[in-house]
Image (cartoon, rainbow, N blue to C red):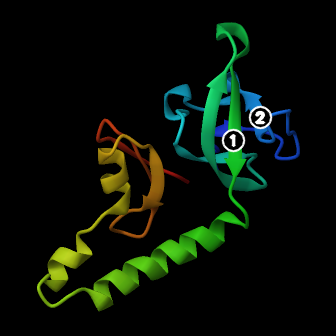
Amino acid sequence: MTVVDIRCDVQQVDESGYVWTFLDEAHDPGVIVPGAIVVAGDDEDPVFAQVVDIVGDEATRRVHLDIAPGAPDLYLRAAARAQLSVDRDMAPSVSESAARTVRFGEVLAGRGQTTVALDEHGRLTRYHPDGSTSPLE
């Protein structure tokens, strides 16, 4: 079963031009910060999205999402290919073992962005800026 970060109707666009939903639709509101890449939509049709902003007062906080085109599995396959490409095409000055230890989720989390990426075992994992991770089912 997929657990989305924030539930939304991807057809619901407001005057901003972005899909919107209420912050209280988030599985973990702490993940929903401007710039974060999140899993949105619903369990049957999840999508990747970037949080554009959060607006409104506390009772009615609205989240604007920029929905990524295409199905999530296309991004996962591309990420897997990119990792293979990094391993194969690294400059001779970087050892093969060092190239394999690049973890893009950790890199982006270190820059303060919550992101979803493949872990070292090929599992889809959410990386948090505080250094913690949580696997996606």
Q: Which residue is mark 2?
A: 20
Q: Position of residue 88 (x, y in %)?
A: 31, 90
Q: Are marks 1 and 2 in contact (CB under 8 Å)?
A: yes
Q: Is residue 9 above or below residue 91?
A: above
Q: Nearer the viewer, residue 95 or 119?
A: 95
Residue shown at 30% from the left, 84% from the top = 87
Quadrant where the C terminus is found in the figure:
bottom right
Q: Position of residue 96 (x, y in %)?
A: 18, 85
Q: Is residue 108 above or below residue 33?
A: below
Q: Amino acid at mark 2?
A: Trp
Q: Is residue 76 above or below residue 22?
A: below
The single residue placed furthest to the front in the displayed view is 16
**Mark 2 crowd level (few <14, some 14–19, many ≥20, 10 Å Cα):** many
* Disc 2, SS: strand
The single residue placed furthest to the right in the displayed view is 11
**Mark 1 crowd level (few <14, some 14–19, many ≥20, 10 Å Cα):** many
Q: Which residue is mark 1?
A: 65
Inspect this view and state whether residue 61 appears: yes
